[in-house]
Image (cartoon, rainbow, N blue to C red):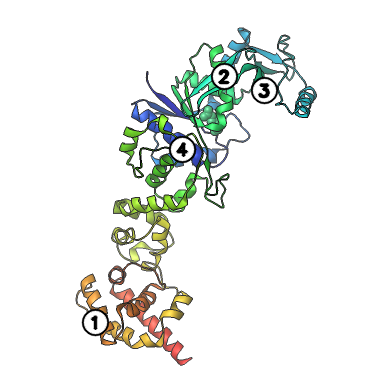
């Protein structure tokens, strides 16, 4: 059997990390079995589907490297086919027109609620099958027996047909509904494995019944639990974003998010770090956890740091530069050189960006707290001497920079840190930067000396005020 999986998002908002995790699982499963992975955009709800949401899906998948073998297939372009299948179900007596009024349906609903039951359509039109104005089309669900879903994650789940009512498969304007389009597409695309969120588990018996009515073999189903926020509750912006592209914009690398999401809810022993090749090799649906997993931002950061430190400098420089449009990158060190230093000591791309602007941007003053603490009159003389020694330094390399700083510190009987930190604030404006020798090397002589001048001016002013 050829494995064919699919990711079938509805383009009605952002790309959810829970959704993308089912896409990753589907993609991995197809790759593992040398099968095919299809991207299907479920945009039949014309009011809620937007072009922006489609672009976000494509962008997110591209960013994570989830290439599809087919698609995007747009359901909105398959209406003729859905109509054809609905016609087929009507012709074989497995679907019927229903003209029940809204009031009637509402009263059924109210009665059910009063009895504390789930509202179900009572089959009033089932044997009348009268097309009419505003008629919807309903699927004739079997009334006896059970539907058994042998879910690869949830185990066996049995639904009694008498609990399922006759589902609307076409609205009164003729447009098909979700359960019908999913079934037609899964059938036409020969989907072998449906891996999707467990919010769809309740749709599965209905979909199986329609597939059977069409003489199609149902695919294997695997319903993946949700991702919860770090507090064990529903994910919210406040506790950890649910949007894939937010993670990109917050400076996470795609391989870190992918590794994190796979591992959250799937395991292979205690292993935490997986290359894509390893995932393809090791992934199996049966090792997906049955219970919902809570997002752990610390662990994601840890993984990001891991991948950041190993990221190719040219690639990383490309990513970092995308966040630094506000400075002129020609006015500072080679970005590849800078990221080589920064990636060893930061956790996200954004952290690199924040701590790298000072190497390029016009100097826009000192961080007030850092200046107050470190640019004090006691360091005036040593900084002045450093200025002199650094102007005369022959070769601007880390070893010579370091020994110059050390010797000035010794001459003034200062511990190295007592000079290095004021120097850091002087040349970068703030208290955080790479090691002081690397910071000066990357800044270059000109910027270093000009900023030392500014720092000395600041200290002078402070001393005289
Ligand atoms: N379009 C559905 C959704 O976004 C998914 C349908 C499916 O995977 O069967 O929730």
Q: Residues within 10 Å of mark 1 (few under 14, many from 20)?
A: some
Label 1, secondary structure: give it.
helix
Q: Is residue 308 left or right of residue 116?
A: left
What residue is shown with label 2? 82
In the rendering, at what x and y percent does residue 347 appear? Answer: 39, 57
User: For the point 54% across and 40% down, which residue is it?
Assistant: 53
The reply to whether the C-beta atoms of the residues labelled 2 and 4 are less than 8 Å apart is: no
Separation (CA) of disc 2 from disc 4: 28 Å
Nearest the camera: 140 or 162?
162
Residue 398 seen: yes
Label 4, secondary structure: give it.
helix
User: For the point 63% across and 15% down, which residue is it?
Assistant: 141
- Asked if ligand 1 lies within 8 A of label 1, the reply is no
Residue 78 seen: no
Separation (CA) of disc 1 from disc 2: 81 Å
- Asked if ligand 1 lies within 8 A of label 4, the reply is no
Q: Is residue 261 left or right of residue 95?
A: left
In the rendering, at what x and y percent does residue 404 appear? Answer: 24, 79
Separation (CA) of disc 3 from disc 1: 83 Å
What residue is shown with label 1? 407
What residue is shown with label 3? 171
Q: Is residue 216 above or below residue 55?
A: above
Separation (CA) of disc 3 from disc 2: 12 Å
User: For the point 34% across and 37% down, which residue is it?
Assistant: 279
Q: Nearer the viewer, mark 2 or mark 4?
A: 4
Of marks 4 and 3, which one's residue comes earlier in the chain? Answer: 4
Displayed quadrant of residue 125:
top right
């Amino acid at each position: 059997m050829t494995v064919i999986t699919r990711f079938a998002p509805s383009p009605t908002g952002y790309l959810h990390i829970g959704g993308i995790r089912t896409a990753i699982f589907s993609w991995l499963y197809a790759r593992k079995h040398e099968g095919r992975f299809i991207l299907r955009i479920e945009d039949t709800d014309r009011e809620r589907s937007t072009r922006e949401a489609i672009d976000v899906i494509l962008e997110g998948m591209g960013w994570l490297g989830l290439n599809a073998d087919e698609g995007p297939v747009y359901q909105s372009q398959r209406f003729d086919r859905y109509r054809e299948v609905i016609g087929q179900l009507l012709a074989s007596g497995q679907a019927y027109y229903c003209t029940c009024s809204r009031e009637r349906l509402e009263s059924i609903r109210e009665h059910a609620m009063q009895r504390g039951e789930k509202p179900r359509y009572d089959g009033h039109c089932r044997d009348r099958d009268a097309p009419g104005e505003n008629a919807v089309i309903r699927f004739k669900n079997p009334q006896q027996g059970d539907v058994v879903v042998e879910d690869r994650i949830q185990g066996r789940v049995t639904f009694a047909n008498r609990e399922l009512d006759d589902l609307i498969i076409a609205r009164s304007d003729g447009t098909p509904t979700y359960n019908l389009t999913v079934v037609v597409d899964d059938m036409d695309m020969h989907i072998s494995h449906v891996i999707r969120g467990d919010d769809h588990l309740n749709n599965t018996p209905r979909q199986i019944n329609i597939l059977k009515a069409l003489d199609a073999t149902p695919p294997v189903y695997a319903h993946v639990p949700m991702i919860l926020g770090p507090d064990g509750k529903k994910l919210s912006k406040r506790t950890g974003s649910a949007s894939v592209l937010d993670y990109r914009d917050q400076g996470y690398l795609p391989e870190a998010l992918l590794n994190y999401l796979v591992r959250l809810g799937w395991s292979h022993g205690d292993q935490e770090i997986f290359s894509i090749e390893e995932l393809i090799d090791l992934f199996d649906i049966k090792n997906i956890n049955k219970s919902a997993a809570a997002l752990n931002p610390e662990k994601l950061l840890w993984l990001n740091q891991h991948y950041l430190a190993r990221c190719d400098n040219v690639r990383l420089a490309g990513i970092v530069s995308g966040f630094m449009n506000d400075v002129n990158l020609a006015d500072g060190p080679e970005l590849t050189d800078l990221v080589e230093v920064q990636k060893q000591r930061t956790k996200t791309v954004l952290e690199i960006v924040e701590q790298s602007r000072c190497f390029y941007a016009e100097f826009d003053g000192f961080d007030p707290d850092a200046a107050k603490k470190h640019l004090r009159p006691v360091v005036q003389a040593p900084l002045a001497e450093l200025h002199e020694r650094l102007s005369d330094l022959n070769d601007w390399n880390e070893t010579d920079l370091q020994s110059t700083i050390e010797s000035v510190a010794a001459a003034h009987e200062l511990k190295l840190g007592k000079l290095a930190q004021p120097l850091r604030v002087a040349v970068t404006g703030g208290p955080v930067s790479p090691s002081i020798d690397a910071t000066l090397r990357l800044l270059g002589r000109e910027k270093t000396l000009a900023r030392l001048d500014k720092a000395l001016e600041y200290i002078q002013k402070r001393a005289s005020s």
